Amino acid sequence: MTDVEITDPQYEDKIRLMQMLSLVRDPELELNIVDLGLIYSIIIDKGKKEVAITMTLSTPACPAGDYIKGGVELMTKEAFKDYVVAIVITFVPEWSADMISATGREELGW
Amino acid sequence: MELADHHIPAKRTIIPYYGAAALSLVAISILTFISAGDFKGHFFQPHLLAITHLTVLGWGTMIIMGASNQLMPVIADSKLYSERIPVVSFILLLFGTCLLVHSFWNFDLEASIFIGASLVLISLTLHAINILLTCKKAQTNNIIIDFILTAHLWLIVTAVIGITLLLNFRLSFLPAEHLHYLKVHASIGMAGWFLLLVIGVSSRLIPMFLLSRKEVKGFLTIAYYLINGGLILLLIEGMVLKSTRWHLVYISLIIAGLLFYMAYVWHCYKSAIRKKMDAGMKQTFVALGIISLPFVLLIAAVMCYHDTPVSVISAYGYSFFAGFITTLIMGQTYKTLPFIVWMHLTKPDRLADLQPKDLYKEQLVTIQMRTYLPGFLLFLSGILLREHYLMYGGCVMMTAASALYCSHVFYIINHLRK
């Protein structure tokens, strides 16, 4: 999961976006995709009005993959109206259960 | 990177299989109730043959074929090779099974039983080809795919032996007695088709559902060679040498393979992040516990081969299908069907209001499990003790659970109409 440092100049924007992305949930695990660790990086270019998100899926053939990607795009456009949104799906590094946040693990009963 | 949407097969390739299988389960319960007394006698009789084939083809194989059309693209990271083949396979399997079961029930060995068996064989072959070609496009090659492909191979072998046995009824060309080949047919079907497929699919799904951090795939490889080694030797000795002398050794190989699979599941569970299990997963683990039951009965049957009471052999087969397979499928239905229906309900321009868990009633799954399991154990006790009051009691509970399951399946499917 991408961590947003408090010293990051875009701290507030990124946190706001992460909160919006938290509304997208994995349908099988019933956990939001941020705590699931699917978001790898967020780059916000206010000058060009662009948001670039690099994310992954739990498996390349995840049947809910298109829904999750669509949800990320939808929520990003909701948070940053008039911005161009670019989403890149990567499988490097491969997602593993170790990427789940402490909150997520607690929710899953670990 | 190709994304999920391209891997989602059309509804018609999956949903009809679930619906037909659910109706078959209710039919099985009713037929079992009607024929409960027959379970006290020899297992080789028309009504039991009809019920067994309805269980194996109309229930087990039907739902497994439908589910594999959904799961294979996930397991093989590849699109289903054809979406037309599953539709043709479904129609052939449905009509073939109806003809076959009807003919067995009336012990009518004329044209209809051969037509039914041929339709089933064509259906299974088409399905196996579709799965093989789907896996051929797979971007990954692993032991799980090997399990699934080999299971399909054993399925075809089982069906071919079955048709040979039907022909033997008419032409009596096989050198050994009919019951000898019937045992080989049943063993290959149970361990080759059902067991290997269940191991293959569950080895992918269990760590995925539990979020396991450790998968000891080496255990699966050992299990694969032990089970297939045992099956090949069983087939050679049974069909070519016409003997059962070393049966216990081959069965021990299969059981050893099963133990390695259990060890794999144990590691998955121990390293799981997701410890909270829903009713579907709980029922799956109950089924994995029940799997020891038929094998204990099998060892008992083989060790006392010359004077094994037929009730033990009937109980062995019954515990495998009505215990292990049925419990497992009932549990996994709630892990797969709501998700399949949910995928067809979601819209690309908004977040889903409902999640898969909202499409079924968790409490009803628990009630269904608590009704079915005691019913099954009661019926099994009835077979072993030859006590028909126990059987009828068990039947009533299993019929209630089956009706509940069937209604639940159609309730889930019905969301697609909204």
Image (cartoon, coloured by chain):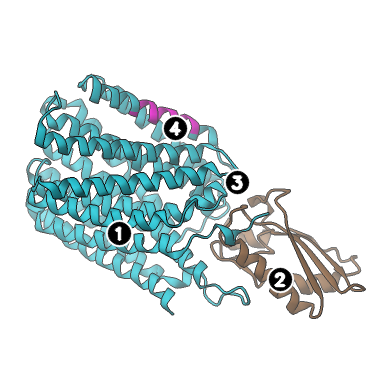
Chain colours: A brown, B cyan
Which of the labelled discs sits on residue B224, or is there none? 4
Q: Position of residue B175 (x, y in %)?
A: 14, 23
Chain at tag 4: B
- The answer to which image quadrant residue B58 occupies is bottom left
Residue A39 drawn above or below residue B408: above
Question: Residue under mark 1: which chain is it in?
Answer: B
User: Looking at the rendered structure, which numbered label has been put on residue B21?
Assistant: 1
Instruction: Kindly identify which residue carries mark 2.
Output: A73
> From this viewpoint, is residue A88 visible?
yes
Amino acid identity at mark 2: Glu
Q: Which residues are magenta?
A: B221-231
Q: Residue at x 70, y 51 (%)?
A: A91
Per the model, the C-alpha gap separating discs 3 and 2 is: 29 Å
Disc 1 to disc 4: CB gap under 8 Å: no
Among numbered discs 1 and 3, the one appearing first in the sequence = 1
Camera-nearest label, 2 or 4: 2
